[in-house]
Each structure stands twice: as structure tokens, then as C-alpha cells.
Image: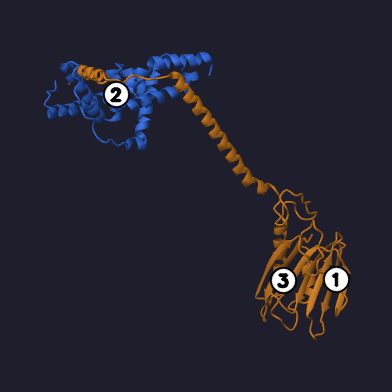
Amino acid sequence: MRKADEQGFREFAAANAASLRRTAYLFCGDWHTAEDLMQSSLMKMYMAWKRIKDLDNLIAYARKVLLRTWLDEKRRPWRRAEQRDGELPDTADATVDPDNTSAKLWARELVHTALLQVPPRQRAVLVLRYFEDLSVAEVAVAMGCTEGTVKSQTARGLATLRTIVEKLDNSSGRVAS
Amino acid sequence: MSEQEIREGMLLAVWDEPPLDFDPDALIRRVEQKKSRRRALVGVGVATAVIAVASFALPGLLPRDRDSQLGSETPPSSSAPPSESAEKKAQRIGERLAETLGVRMTNFKEVYSDFRTVSTTSSPNSPSGQRNAADDPDLHGYVHLTDGIGPTALRVTGGKLPYELDLCSGAVYCHSSTRSDGSVVTEAEYAEGAQEITRSVSVRKFKSGYVAQIQSFNYNPASGSGLRQTVPVRVGVLTELVTDSSINWE
């Protein structure tokens, strides 16, 4: 690869690595896996850089690669067979605002418990629509499906998420709004 | 739960994001290593495929004579089709002889042949230690037959002999004739002290020096047993076999 192209990739990767890792985290719910997904996606992009470097919306292409990489990873048996030993014990951080902490813990719960129970493609639609703030058309391009499918997957995903959150709230005493 | 809440919840979910330790140069190095490993793997795969294909294809391209060395130059036979191997030729001659004998001698219950080529062993009738012309494999086989007495066989040999056959000495009958193609047919019968014929032989010597020989014994030459009063096939039939125009001996 030419030095100029390599420099172009280097800049793109440095600028978007964090954002891609956040999206990957919302897909998979684990920061380590998210980092792996981000790196795998960037490696794939580097191998195809000569061909894709002139695309209008490179970050949209990167999100598409990330989504495909995650869905591929999920299909692998060794990934499915991952076993966790148990929950890490929660310890209170006395330096933070208790109200703010409560909201953050609930948000973490939202991701770890509720979002991860939503089927993968519906979850991907929710993340791209509400975290990445993409339009229906952009999500359709990223997922390689029609806009109608995006809309239906969004509706189903929201319904599933609301049901799960409602159950969580009922079990923890928090009233869903 | 509103869409806005979901949006805020997702933003809050990444609040405890661990610091990112990302080095694009390390990533590029990893990709380059991966590429070179893949290239090496493809190279090994292609080399393995080439070796596999060559090992399967090479024996088919080289001469298949059983006793000839791979890659040695074997001059094609002047009379046989070039594509026919010596083994196939022997098999063809044997089958044809068995067929002709079966038609000629209808009293035989079973007639079949067992032929092969021998390029380094001495001819069955040659003096010990003498070898045939090395570049032309000998034909050697038996036409097995079963008559009213039991199973026996005719011995058939073919090849260029490095010596002259003296068939007439000791024979009770010996006769030579020249055929239209220039080959000389000599037929002889021997009693060897007995009252009946104990051995019949018909030999055809071609201009090229190739000698085809069919012999009938008062025993089974294939097994060395099965002694009987006289030969199962007399010399007249043997001569018919050795002069069969449908057999290309050379």
C-alpha cells in the first residue's frame, strides 16, 4: 500500500476507533469483545482500503463492516459457548453523585440485561437508530436490507425491549415511564 | 419507556467506557503479517496440489511396462499398435489362442489362457543362463484346457532367441515350411522312448528373428503334474494355432 493511503487509513482509524468500539459494545455488551470487533473491522477495512478509500461515507461503511463482523462472530460456536463464572461484586463509589449513579446503573442494566435479550438484528437496528442517530435509510444501507424491514425490526425491537424493561422494573421496584 | 429514554439510556450505558489503547500502526503490522502468512499458506497449498497432480499424472504419462524402468526409452513395436502395452498384447494373444483352440477342439470342456511378459528371465527352453534380447520382452504363458482325462495346458512362448533351435534331432516327426510372409514354421513330435507321442511342438520363426513356439506335453507344464499317455493336442493343431493369421505375434 502506498504511504499516502496508509496515512489516510491511520487517520481514519484513529478518529473513529472509539466510536466504533462504543457501537460494538452496545451490540455485544462487553468491552473486550467490543475492542476485538472494532479491531477486526478496521483490519478488514485496511485490507480493502485501496478499493474503499474514496467512498463518500466511510464511517457508514465501517459501521456496516462492524455489524457484519459482530453477526459473524455470533454465529461461531466457540463464541456462543462462552461461560461466565458469575457477577462481579458491586462496590459503591463514594465520590459520585448518588442520583446520577442510580441513572447510570439503570442504563448499564438496560444494556446488560434488557438490550442483550433483544434478538441480534433487532438490537442492531435499535443501536443504529437510537445510539448512532441514523435515519431509516442509513440503517437500511448498513444492514443491507430494505427500509420497510428496518421499520418493522425497529417496532419489534422496541416492543421486546419495553417488555423486558417492564419486567426488570417490576422486579426491582422502579416504575417504567 | 419512550424512544428518548432509550436514546439517553444507551448514551449513559457507555459512560464507564475503559480508556482506549489503540495503535493504528500495530494494527497495520498485524494485517501485513496476516497477509504474508496467507500468501505462504497459499504457496504451500499450490505446491501440494502440483505435487499431488504430478504424482497422479506422471505414471500415466510414462511407459507402463511392468519390468521396465520409469522414464526409460522403450522403442515402439514395429507391428503392434504403439498404444498397446506388452501386457495387453500378451493377454490378447492368449485369448485369441484359447478361442481358436476351443473352436478347433470341440471335445475340450474348458479352455482359457494365462499369459504374461518376462523381459529378464531366461526363456523356458533356452539353455540355463542365456537371456533373450533385452529390449524386447518375452511372451510366456499357458493355454489351459480340460479334456476327458483332466486339466492340462499348452505352453506358449514368444521372443527373440539368441540361439538356433534344433527341433529335428530326436524327433519322430519333423517338418519345416516357409509361409507367404517369409516366416518359417517347423513342427516336430517326440516320443522320447515311449510308444506314444510325449511332446509336440510347432515353432514359427519370423524374418525379424522373433520366434513363436507352442508346445504340448504328456503332462501339465503349468503345474508339472498330471502325467498322461500322450499329448492332448497334436502338432497339426499347434501349427494351426501358431499360423493363425488373426494373431499378431511380433
Give amino acid for label 2. Answer: Leu
Q: Give the residue furthest to the front.
A: A94
Q: Quick one: which chain is orange?
A: B
Q: Which disc is residue A26 wearing?
A: 2
- Which one is closest to the eye, mark 2 or mark 3? 2
Q: Against A105, is B90 above or below? A: below
| Chain A representation colour | blue
The x and y percentages for residue A73 are 37, 31
Q: Which residue is mark 3?
A: B101
User: Do the residues marked 1 and 3 share a common chain?
Assistant: yes
Q: Secondary structure at mark 2?
A: helix
Chain identity of mark 1: B
Mark 1 → mark 2, Cα distance in angstroms: 101 Å
Give amino acid for label 3. Answer: Leu
Give amino acid for label 1. Answer: Thr
Q: Against B190, is A118 above or below? A: above
Q: Nearer the viewer, residue A153 or A165?
A: A165
Quarter placement of the C terminus of chain A: top left
Say left or right for B162 vs B56: right
Q: Which residue is mark 1?
A: B186
| Residue at x 80% of width, y 85% of height | B194
Mark 2 → mark 3, Cα distance in angstroms: 90 Å
- Which one is closest to the eye, mark 1 or mark 3? 1
The x and y percentages for residue B150 are 66, 79
Chain identity of mark 3: B
- CB within 8 Å, label 2 to label 3: no
Q: Is residue B203 visible?
A: yes
Say left or right for A102 vs B230: left
The x and y percentages for residue A170 are 12, 28
User: Do the residues marked 1 and 2 share a common chain?
Assistant: no
